[in-house]
Image: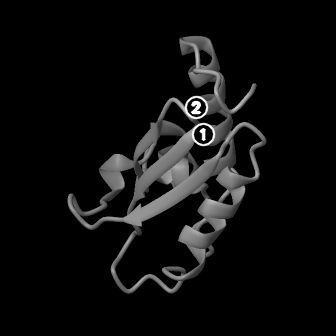
Amino acid sequence: MSAEAQNTPADKLMVEAQVVQALSSVFDPEIPVNIYDLGLIYEVNIDDSNNVKIKMTLTAPGCPAAQELPVEVTNKVQAIPEVKSAQVEIVWDPPWNPDRMSEVAKLQLGYE
């Protein structure tokens, strides 16, 4: 896809699926579940040029991985060939809680 080309809805869905796959490959070092299923990803925005902006949180403000996780997320998303750039913003509102986890994560951690 050339830099001037506009994304079609199908292109955008493909990139979004790749971003979700990349996010699903990042794990909180203290919890054996990926950050996407943990519910740490609050928002993913992809513009027409494939610049990706991600709003995410951490399980707690004092999370030991606070420095590493955003960098890992940025690197994995930027590694997607179709992605022009990736930016991660850490947000604390609303605070994370176990209700944000996917059913898969709840099963893996014994919440069900």
Q: Is residue 90 left or right of residue 71?
A: left
Residue 6 picture location, percent across and down:
58, 21
At mark 2, the secondary structure is helix
Number of numbered discs visible in the structure rendering: 2
Q: Quadrant of the N terminus?
A: top right
Location of mark 1 (residue):
20
Residue 74 picture quarter: bottom right
Q: Amino acid at mark 2?
A: Glu
Q: Amino acid at mark 1?
A: Val
Residue 62 picture location, percent across and down:
38, 86
Give the residue drawn at x 69%, y 53%: 78
Q: Residue 49: give its label.
A: none
Where 68 falls versus 56 (above or below)?
Answer: below
Residue 46 picture location, percent across and down:
49, 36
At mark 1, the secondary structure is helix
Residue 73 picture location, percent across and down:
61, 61
Location of mark 2 (residue):
16
Asked if the residue at tag 2 contacts the one at tag 1, i.e. Cβ–Cβ closer than 8 Å, the answer is yes
Q: Quadrant of the C terminus?
A: top left
From the viewer's side, name the closer residue of 92 and 47.
Answer: 47
